[in-house]
Amino acid sequence: MVTMTEVARAAGVSVSTVSHVVNGTRLVAPKTRERVQHAMRVLGYQHHPTARSLAAGSNQTIGLAITAASNPYWVELIQGIDGEATRAGLNLIIVDTRDDARHEAAAVANLIAHHIEGLVIAPAVGWRDVTLPLLRDHPIPYVVVDRIDPDLRVDQVGVENEAATAAVVDHLISLGHTRIGMLLGIEGLSTSSERLRGYHAAHQRAGLPVDRALLVDGLSTSDGGRRAAWELLELDRPPTAVFAANNNMTIGALAAFRAAGVKVPRDLAIAAFDDFAWADLFSPGLTTVAQPSAAIGARAVQLLLRRMNDPGAPPQAVRLPAEIMHRESCGCTP
């Protein structure tokens, strides 16, 4: 069975764009729509309209509320969700939350209006104030993905952020680094706070104090990462190694180091959270924490199906392990 992911790849667009063309949830530029429709015809993609399923008493459609930021991690996560939904015979409607709680709430309301049977959501900062009450007023099964909220008793799936971060910072410490800078992600996200806890845990285990000047906001963006890296380089006592808490900030940091004439790893080591396809093509290759993105997405759909079939089942919070990809940027021999 052909999936939205395959159509998106053939048309050169995002999976969310294919979803908008198929489900009519947002206007798409005519030329882009024609390209998607052509790819659907060539590949033989078959969409089962919601109305047809409603006649049988079930629309067999789930929603995905997620930021459409251009980040390889989100792309792979969406592919995992789309693939598992297709295997389960489910239609998928994707909406872009723009990582803004109010826009997220409006997008989720739109999904509910389309009579979805379940929802997978990667919540934005502040979602408890606007989106969560909406989900409680319109009780549909839902699963939180990536950004796990430990205080919320609902089905959730993500990665072991704290343990993975501690492991990679442990590695930098074992190489002799005692001043390790960290580029921090968006404040208020559980992923950001968990990775910061991992940084602190590694220092505590090694008996090293944490210099607050080495913790700089990178805002999870490449621009933020570049500015944060410059801030670290301009310290009276700059770090000898840097840990970037996501791949966008890694790209920004590398740009800053190159502009400053800093050679990695000769002058400064770097390691990062989030692996991406070309990480080993950099010179030097990047040492990263690789998340099982597609597996996280697939597991989220499996949890959602379980919730849809058994509303009274106890909630599960699933953490999948990450893998450290050792390359040269940390100072190791490949």
Image: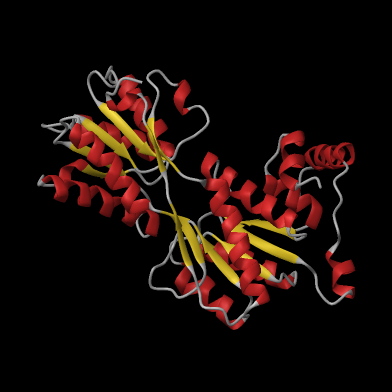
Q: Is residue 211 visible to the viewer in this orientation of the structure?
A: no
Dividing the image into 4 quarters, which one contains the C terminus? top left
Q: Compared with residue 205, is residue 102 higher up or lower down, i.e. above or below?
A: below
Q: Is residue 175 left or right of residue 126?
A: left
Q: Position of residue 215 (x, y in %)?
A: 23, 45
The residue depicted at 37 percent of the width and 19 percent of the height is 284
The residue depicted at 67 percent of the width and 42 percent of the height is 14
Q: Is residue 326 left or right of residue 101?
A: left
Q: Compared with residue 155, is residue 269 higher up or lower down, i.e. above or below?
A: above
Q: Position of residue 67 (x, y in %)?
A: 55, 52
Nearest the viewer among 10 and 307 is 307
Q: Compared with residue 155, is residue 39 higher up or lower down, i.e. above or below?
A: above
Q: Position of residue 131 (x, y in %)?
A: 53, 71
Q: Is residue 66 left or right of residue 272?
A: right
Q: Is residue 240 visible to the viewer in this orientation of the structure?
A: yes
The residue depicted at 56 percent of the width and 80 percent of the height is 136
The residue depicted at 41 percent of the width and 66 percent of the height is 149
Q: Position of residue 323 (x, y in %)?
A: 41, 41
Colouring style = secondary structure
Numbered disc total: 0
